[in-house]
Image (cartoon, rainbow, N blue to C red):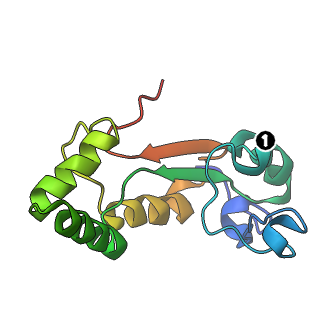
Amino acid sequence: MWPRSAGDSWNAGRRARCSRPRGACGRSRAPLPVLHPGQEGIQPKTLSKELGPQGVRVTAVAPGWIYTQASEHLVARLAASGGTDEATARQGIVEALGGIPIGRPSWPEEVAELVAFLASDRAASIHGAEYTIDGGTVPVV
């Protein structure tokens, strides 16, 4: 095992916050709630090369449909407006997305576990990578 020093990225305790460019959306450097691949022209590999030497690890998580409370409300609204049950409304969303091979949306806990792992010391050498967590909806090569 390599010896760890105070300057190593897994001990640095540094954090990076991605922001909108100054003036975007009428705000000055407001934090992005989620950084999607390609958003604002920022890619994980590009950021990793810039921030890695400063001890900052960069990874991106690209979630698909996550079954949150907002998703539950959407399903209920679609069922009510379509005069159908919630299972049919959920299936309609799955079909609108082009299908989800695992047959369901992801759960928030599944995304949280991935993010927790990526933020942990166990992922110290994972840098510049992007993880799609969408049940197989988007074909990734």
Foreground: 53 or 27? 27
x, y percent for residue 57: 69, 56
| Residue 140 higher or lower than 40, as above or below | above
- Residue at left offset 46%, top offset 29%: 140
Mark 1 neighbour class, 10 Å CA radius: few under 14, some 14 to 19, many 20 or more = few
- Residue at left offset 46%, top offset 44%: 132
- Residue at left offset 64%, top offset 57%: 35
Residue furthest to the top in view is 141
Q: Quadrant of residue 138?
A: top left
Q: Quadrant of residue 29?
A: bottom right
- With 118 as the anchor, is 73 left or right in this view? left
Foreground: 45 or 126? 45
- With 44 as the anchor, is 104 left or right in this view? left
Tag 1's secondary structure?
helix
- With 28 as the anchor, is 115 left or right in this view? left
Foreground: 18 or 96? 96
x, y percent for residue 102: 21, 42
- Residue at left offset 65%, top offset 46%: 127
Q: Quadrant of residue 124?
A: bottom right
Number of numbered markers = 1
x, y percent for residue 123: 53, 54
Q: Amino acid at mark 1?
A: Thr
| Residue 54 higher or lower than 141, as above or below | below
Residue furthest to the right in view is 22
State the residue position of label 1: 46
x, y percent for residue 112: 41, 66
- With 133 as the anchor, is 11 left or right in this view? right
